[in-house]
Amino acid sequence: MITHPRAVVIAAIFVPWTAFVVWLSVVLGWLGAVLAVVLTIGCVVAYRKAGGQLFADVSAASESELSTSGLPTADETVFLNVSATVHWQAAKVESYHADVAREFVLQQAREVTAKWRPAQYSLAQHELAARIGRPATADGGDLEVWATALRLGLPEAVEQHLAKMDEAHRHGLLWEVGAANENRVRSYLRDDALRTPASAVVWWLAQHDGSVERAVELAEVLTKLSRLATGASETDVSAESQHLIEAIQKLEEPARRPAAHSLADAFDQAGVPIVAQALREEYNLPTLRPLADPPPSGDSDAGSRPGRAWSVGNDR
């Protein structure tokens, strides 16, 4: 800390004066004490009449405004602006103190802002204000420096650029989340729900519990949907018939054979006889066979002839 001339003068006068008052009191008793009080009052009055120049501080605190740019940040391409009121006080007044004080504040500012990202300049401002808001020694201990009214900020163009970058980043994150969710749904439908016609029917039944009849009606549509989703051929469905059987097994015992019968007929009509045959074999169901072959496709009267007749048989 700086030792001010005012403090030195006060100490140089107070110590001898105290010793003199004590000596008077010891030697003269109460008369000495009265005499010491009278002398003290006389000195104070004389000091005030002299205008108090004896104890005047030879170096009152000075101040200067600081405003500049170019403070570094954690991003080497972005710099901050700074403004502050710089204060300093020294035992001896020198013309260069203003420059030393401002440089000291800038040095402290550079050390702080270099650790923070540009978007965090308000946090850097708080740290810097706490560091330089109280007096600190500079210039080899001959100068006390501090700063008030500190402000850090980004250039307007940089601030607008960072705002746009932040907005684009948020939109990008939202897009990535949406795309990831879409990929999960697509994978689930392609690799699980619609992997085979049987799994497509099971998937639909899971979404519409107890609607077996409606599932039969939609069997053809679900079969085509499965093939379109997976690119599978008709021969690929034979290995997946077990999925449909497992779904039927989850029904109550009395409902299993009727459900299997209805689904087998639906898969026959949908052109998936492999699944239909697997259901009939599993549950020992009768097979529908045509009584007569259908008319040739080129027959012009095919549209006016009665439909195909069916008989009930059993493969077993």
Image (cartoon, rainbow, N blue to C red):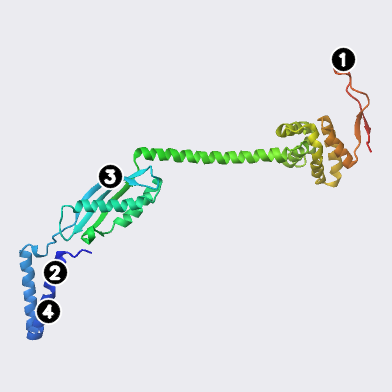
Q: Nearer the viewer, mark 1 or mark 2?
A: 2
Q: Residue at x 41, y 40 (%)?
A: 162
Q: Nearer the viewer, mark 3 or mark 4?
A: 3
Q: Which residue is mark 1?
A: 301
Do callouts 2 and 4 mark residues in contact (Cβ within 8 Å)? no
- Specify the quadrant of the image occupied by residue 38: bottom left
N-terminal of the pair, mark 3 or mark 4, is 4
N-terminal of the pair, mark 1 or mark 4, is 4
Q: Secondary structure at mark 4?
A: helix
Tell me which amino acid carries mark 3.
Thr
Q: Secondary structure at mark 3?
A: strand
In the rendered image, residue 277, in percent from the top left (x then y), is placed at 87, 36
Which labelled disc corresponds to residue 19? 4
Q: Residue at x 49, y 41 (%)?
A: 170
Tell me which amino acid carries mark 4.
Ala
Tell me which amino acid carries mark 1.
Asp
Question: Spatial distance from mark 2 to mark 4, Cα to Cα?
Answer: 14 Å
Q: Which residue is mark 3?
A: 68
